[in-house]
Amino acid sequence: MRHVQRPVPQQQPPPAYDDGYGDEPSYDSGYNTGQVYGQQSRAGHGGGGDDYGPPTGRPARRPANWGRRIKWTVITVVAVVAVTSIATYFWADSKLHRDVDLSKVIDRPEAGDGTNYLIVGTDSREGMSDEQKKKLHTGSAEGKRTDTMMILHVGGNGDTLVSLPRDSNVTIPSFKGAESGKLYPGTGRQVKLNAAYAEDGPELLVRTVESNTGLHIDHYAEIGFAGFANIVDAVGGVEMDLKEGFKDKWSGADFEKGKQTLNGQQALAFVRTRHAFAASDLQRTKNQQAFLAALAHKVASPTTVMNPFKLYPTMGAGLDSLVVDKDMSLWDLGSMFMAMKSVSGGDGTSMNMPTNGSTGGNLLWDKAKVKQLVDQFNNDEKVTVTSD
């Protein structure tokens, strides 16, 4: 039988991959064109080049509106600060004791340029227990007297703090009784300056200072023993660098030479000490100025101002203890404090009232220098007068 050779069927190539999308081109990995896996060509989208947007069919992710968030955050912070500031203002204003009426002071000198504050520290024991009096070495005398008196001039040519020694010899002028309203004619009676306060309070003290200097006093501020000690404790004590150590059994002072942090009790002893020094009253006023300088810096330091747990107790202790005139505003009080800080920082001048000898144990003011000093205050000129 003849062998018949059958033709070998031709092998067909396998069908192309059909992804089910009709006439779309087959899958291309992108390696031939340098395209990164997972990115799509813009071909078919009307543009050229690579498309770095989101995959086709997935909604675009809207970026967070940071501008709006920042705006509302700022608004919230400002609102909180504003509300806190307003609340703090009314809280502080309500704590001021506006008990001194300067309208009762008669025959006053004409006001000059700048602002003059009479700052007074008294030995008031009001509200103190027997234990506190013993601890602070205040004694138990009735009434209150002035331990510290200073004139602070705030002006455009530098601030000046002038200490008035309590033993200054002054003449009591005619005055109207603060409580009685009765007129007491002047008799030329001469006393120590601190006797004016003891006789008829702040109004007579202002009247006496104005009459003996010719300077108009715009505002009055007073603080007692307990209040002073409380402020020092509220700020956590005040550091002092003493050139010499000293002791005084009357004030309770017992200090070594060198740097040390004084608490309220020690601070009160420091500013009251007079028996430990030969020039008792003059040295005490210098110590008072030095301590107030250190205290002002501590109160205004960031560790106090930026810490509400220190700031509010300090403000509370100070405001609770202050007695001011009826026209004193918180703005005036702030101006007074900042001026004291300016003086203590070296931008202003601190001095004792110029003296020239004594009579009967009382210090005599140098009349020529006092007149020059008052003229410079009234004209708001740079102070050139010295106390030495």
Image (cartoon, rainbow, N blue to C red):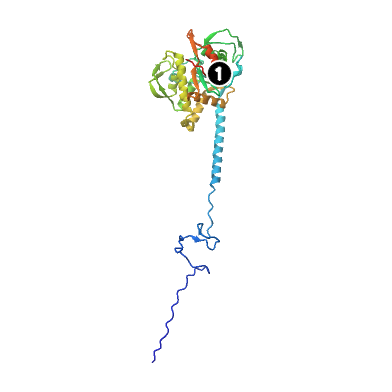
Assess disc 1: are there few (<14), some (14-19) or many (≥20) residues with their C-alpha within 10 Å of its C-alpha.
Answer: some
Residue 343 coordinates in the image, percent (x, y): 49, 23
Against 155, residue 16 (above or below) is: below
Residue pictured at 45% horizontal, 19% vertical: 287
Which element type, helix, strand or loop, lies under badge 1? helix
Report which residue position mark 1 lands on. 376
Q: Is residue 176 left or right of residue 251?
A: right
Q: Using the image as rendered, state which of residue 213 and residue 333 is in the foreground.
A: 213
Q: Is residue 183 left or right of residue 286?
A: right
Q: Using the image as rendered, state which of residue 33 and residue 299 is in the foreground.
A: 33
Q: Using the image as rendered, state which of residue 134 and residue 121 is in the foreground.
A: 121
Residue pictured at 39% horizontal, 17% vertical: 246
Q: Is residue 129 visible?
A: no
Residue 71 coordinates in the image, percent (x, y): 56, 43
Q: How many marks?
A: 1
Residue 40 coordinates in the image, percent (x, y): 50, 61
Residue 304 coordinates in the image, percent (x, y): 47, 30
Quarter of the rendering occupied by the N terminus: bottom left
The residue at the far bottom in this view is: 1
Q: Is residue 336 visible?
A: yes
The part of the image, by quadrant, that contains residue 248 is top left
The amino acid at mark 1 is: Gln
